[in-house]
Amino acid sequence: MNYTAPRGTKDVLPPASQAWQKVEMKFRELCKRFSYGEIRTPTFEQTELFARGVGDATDVVQKEMYNFEDKGGRAMTLRPEGTAGVVRAYLEHGLSSLPSPQKFFYIISAFRYEKMQKGRYREFEQMGCECFGSGEPSADAEIISLLWIFFSELGMADISLQLNSIGCPNCRPAYLDQLRGYLRPHLDELCEDCQKRFETNPMRILDCKQESCQAVTKEAPSPLDTLCPDCQAHWDELLRLLDYYEIPYRINKRIVRGLDYYTRTVFEFISENVGSQGTICGGGRYDGLVDELGGQPTPAVGFALGVERLLLELEAQDLLPQLDHQPDIFIASFPSYQDQASAFAYRLRAAGIHAESDILGRSFKAQMKHANRTQARYLMVFGEEEAARMIGKVKRMSDGEELEMSFDELVQFLLQQV
Ligand code: HAM
């Protein structure tokens, strides 16, 4: 039998995996600058958590979850996203009684049974942040500014921040009535999914990608037109802050998000390059979720960024982080000096240097061939003289220059080059 990775999943092999490590490291480092601490939650949770948290009527819950019954007969689900699990942990560990705000970041695998497309997988990686305890627009602005710095430091162009407000439980019912009233005469022009959404989740019709639905919703009312005074004030203040920070944005009434927990601010970072899967990052405020999952009412805001889509975008813009897989030094040896050579490689590695030596029992000639293939920066040959005098000759491979020094000096020399 031939085994292959399950449809919608992928293997990430070295050295390409370095690009993943680099964006993850950048994200970690940036989260630290904003005082976000890492949270790790389980890969699977009770199905009920997502049904309640993400929303029964969403595509994610209705069509895309990997549900299973465990051996104890409990209904479990591989997490389709990170927020619900983080809220569960926030409540379970009593973090709501600690001083606000509480800020968390995560780097996780998420699972959705979706139709395969470029940038759309069944197992994918999300890097996300969640901030609990502040209902202020400055919390929304802070989280957006984190993303803006992240994309800027990666050098990304052609990515736009698109924003909307979808109101709160006070003002949304009036908006939904207005929207249904507008859509009702056009029901038969909508796709089959949107005809169902008309009753359960009409706002989602605004972000349907079908041309016929987009044509119908072109002139549809915007939730921004019916915000209650508190939501309006929140929205105005957020825009004022973004203007003040000089973070450019576009207001887009079609940004309504696919998950049910959002209130007020919703946003996406959208690229012009990845086609229909151009949403690299999505997030917003979810002031009702902590309450919904059994806690005290607690305002919260967050986002998640799709790492596969980010890397596709970086590749399209020729911005993939430089890979550095070449060893600093390759130590080739004549057969009787193999132990000394590998012991010296061990010493160099312990000192923090990327060193390679032979572990296949290759001939000297074959080792030299391999050294070339590794593109090592320096080459050292370990033979009788090196073993006797503890002095090594290293050759800089870029120009062939040879340098002679003691082993101790060599360690220091290479450390300066790293
Ligand atoms: P989401 O928009 O469902 O939001 O997902 C966030 C990001 O994950 C998307 O923008 C996309 O880049 C990536 N993504 C989603 N599905 C796939 C897929 N099938 N294949 C590849 N990438 C995908 C959330 O998950 C919310 N939890 C975000 C959030 C956090 N809101 C508040 N806090």
Image: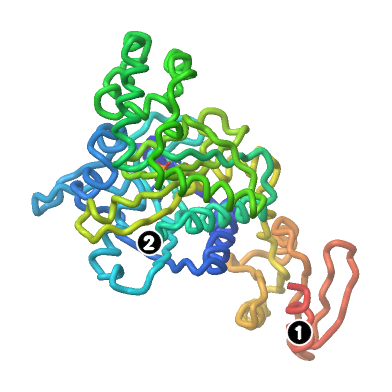
Left or right of 223, for residue 368: right
Q: Which residue is mark 1?
A: 412
Residue 129 lies, with reference to residue 120, above or below; the image says below
Left or right: 381, with 67 as reference point? right
Residue 287 vs 8, above or below: the answer is below
Could you say which disc has been placed on residue 133 in the image? none
At horizontal 44% and vertical 19% (from top left) the residue drawn is 217
Q: Quadrant of the N terminus?
A: top left
Q: Position of residue 324 (x, y in %)?
A: 68, 60
Image quadrant assignment for residue 203: top left
Q: Nearer the viewer, mark 1 or mark 2?
A: 2
Residue farthest to the left, as pictured: 73
SS category of the residue bearing label 1:
helix
- Spatial separation of the CA atoms under disc 1 and disc 2: 48 Å
User: Which quadrant would the C terminus be assigned to in this image?
Assistant: bottom right
Q: Residue at x 73, y 83 (%)?
A: 411
Image quadrant of ligand 1 equals top left
Q: Nearer the viewer, residue 118 or 162?
A: 162
Across and down, in percent, residue 115 comes to 39, 29
Residue contact at pointers 1 and 2, CB within 8 angstroms = no
- Residue 376 placement: quadrant: bottom right
Q: Is mark 1 within 8 Å of ligand 1?
A: no
The kind of residue tagged 1 is Gln
Above or below for 228 versus 24: above
Residue under label 2:
132
Find residue 51 and report its horizontal and vertical position in percent. 22, 43
How packed is label 1: few (under 14 Cα within 10 Å), some, or many (20 or more)?
A: few
Query: Residue 84 at what x, y percent from top left?
Result: 30, 52
Question: In the image, 106: left or right of 390?
Answer: left
Q: Amino acid at mark 2?
A: Phe
Please, what secondary structure does the residue beneath circle 2 have?
A: strand
Residue nearest the observer in this picture, 120 or 260: 260
